[in-house]
Image (cartoon, rainbow, N blue to C red):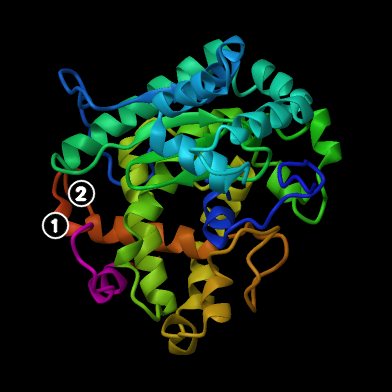
């Protein structure tokens, strides 16, 4: 039988995962949103799926074990078993056997997680950062859904699995760039630039940004132009930075400090490449997405291979910050509410 959770035979990564897994506030110097007295709703759940798997009551039979998995988080269990790992139907006791098979075959990965991204102290730190960010988001959007958080092993299939109700965070994607286990991963799926972003300190920021991208994807027009994607990504990045006010802009972009420095030094030159109407208002998906796709560099004409990737995200963020100006974070009408990119273009003067 073919097992999709084998390290050496990973199933296709959706495009949004490639975009997502790819990110000191650098904008207006407004004070961080205070979270004292802000509480997440009582319905909020945070689940360490590593512990759920470790505590399976195997001596009590498949039915009891299945109930244990379902009760830990029913929505996540369904997606994890049927989509993330494709083990089998979430209501089938035979899927318990496939889960045990997964744990046996992926034992080295599980052990590696325990000493890196899933180490108790580190996970507690990332959890605190993510919950603080969710509280700031709740201050900005009091009526918005607050997603549950599930720390999961994904078999190197998904770095993030966001839904409107919860976000799954693949701990195996954040075990540090030079982990020996990466030598077993297929290089065409895990090129060096992607491995360099597997940093355990980036879990919380990646998780919230990934959830925001999925939560607000309806803001993207059906046939987006480059300028539409600049605005969408810029708004997402600005919102993420407000929720993580003490995180460097380089980390929020999933860049090194050197890459951020390069972009800052070349901002005007980058803008000159995207500014022509033939680029700015282009609707060809391939031409548009070259500015926003993960890669070793931004594959746009006129830019050197020494540049970082996703420079469209960087410019969009700068464009939104220019429009926001010195407005307070809570003044969402100045930068979040608008869907017309023209005022942002007019405000941006690199």
Say which of marks 1 and 2 sits in front.
1
Measure how far apart labels 1 and 2 are at the Cα level: 13 Å
User: Image point 45% across, 85% down: which residue?
Assistant: 283
According to the picture, the residue beneath numbered tag 1 turns out to be 333
Residue placed furthest toward the bottom:
278
According to the picture, the residue beneath numbered tag 2 turns out to be 326
Instruction: Name the image quarter holding the C terminus.
Output: bottom left
Residue placed furthest toward the right:
183
Q: Secondary structure at mark 1?
A: helix
Question: Looking at the rendering, which quadrant does residue 319 occupy?
Answer: bottom left
Q: Earlier in the sequence, mark 1 or mark 2?
A: 2
Q: Is residue 343 visible?
A: yes
Is 344 within the magenta? yes
User: Image point 64% across, 31% down: which residue?
Assistant: 99
Q: Secondary structure at mark 2?
A: loop
Q: Residues within 10 Å of mark 1 (few under 14, many from 20)?
A: few
Return the x and y of residue 276 as percentages of the image width and height: 46, 85
Looking at the image, which is closer to me, 313 or 106?
106
Looking at the image, which is closer to me, 185 or 350?
185
User: Image point 37% across, 59% down: which residue?
Assistant: 234
Return the x and y of residue 281 as percentages of the image width and height: 41, 85
Question: Looking at the rendering, which quadrant does residue 116 occupy?
Answer: top right
Is 200 within the magenta? no
Return the x and y of residue 290 as percentages of the image width and height: 59, 72
The image shows residue 134, relative to residue 334, as above or below, that is: above
The image shows residue 304, relative to residue 206, as above or below, that is: below
Q: Is residue 32 visible?
A: no
Residue numbers of the magenta segment: 336-347
Looking at the image, which is closer to me, 181 or 337?
181
User: Image point 58% across, 50% down: which residue?
Assistant: 22
Return the x and y of residue 179 as percentages of the image width and height: 78, 29
Q: Residues within 10 Å of mark 2 (few under 14, many from 20)?
A: some
């Amino acid at each position: 039988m073919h097992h999709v959770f084998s390290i050496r035979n990973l199933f296709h990564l959706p495009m949004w995962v490639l975009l997502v897994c790819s990110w000191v506030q650098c904008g207006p110097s407004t004070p961080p949103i205070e979270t004292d007295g802000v509480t997440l709703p009582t319905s909020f759940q945070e689940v360490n799926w590593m512990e759920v798997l470790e505590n399976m009551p195997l001596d009590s039979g498949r039915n009891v074990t299945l109930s244990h998995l379902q009760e830990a988080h029913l929505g996540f269990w369904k997606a994890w078993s049927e989509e993330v790992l494709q083990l089998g139907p979430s209501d089938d006791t035979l899927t318990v056997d496939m889960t045990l098979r997964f744990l046996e075959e992926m034992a080295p990965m599980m052990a590696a997680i325990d000493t890196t991204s899933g180490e108790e102290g580190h996970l507690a730190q990332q959890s605190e950062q993510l919950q603080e960010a969710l509280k700031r988001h709740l201050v900005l959007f009091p009526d918005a859904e607050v997603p549950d958080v599930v720390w999961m092993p994904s078999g190197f299939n998904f770095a993030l699995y966001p839904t409107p109700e919860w976000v799954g965070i693949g701990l195996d994607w954040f075990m540090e760039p030079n982990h020996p286990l990466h030598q077993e991963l297929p290089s065409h799926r895990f090129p060096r630039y992607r491995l360099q972003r597997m940093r355990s300190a980036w879990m919380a920021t990646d998780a919230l940004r990934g959830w925001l991208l999925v939560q607000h994807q309806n803001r993207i027009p059906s046939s987006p132009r480059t300028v539409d994607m600049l605005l969408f990504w810029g708004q997402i990045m600005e919102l993420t930075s407000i929720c993580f006010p003490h995180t460097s802009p380089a980390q929020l972009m999933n860049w090194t400090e050197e890459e951020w420095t390069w972009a800052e030094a070349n901002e005007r030159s980058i803008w000159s490449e995207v500014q022509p109407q033939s680029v700015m208002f282009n609707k060809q998906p391939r031409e548009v997405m070259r500015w926003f796709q993960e890669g070793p560099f931004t594959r746009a004409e006129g830019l050197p291979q020494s540049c970082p990737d996703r420079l469209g995200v960087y410019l969009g963020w700068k464009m939104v910050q220019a429009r926001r100006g010195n407005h307070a974070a809570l003044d969402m009408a100045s930068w979040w509410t608008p869907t017309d990119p023209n005022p942002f273009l007019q405000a941006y003067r690199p």
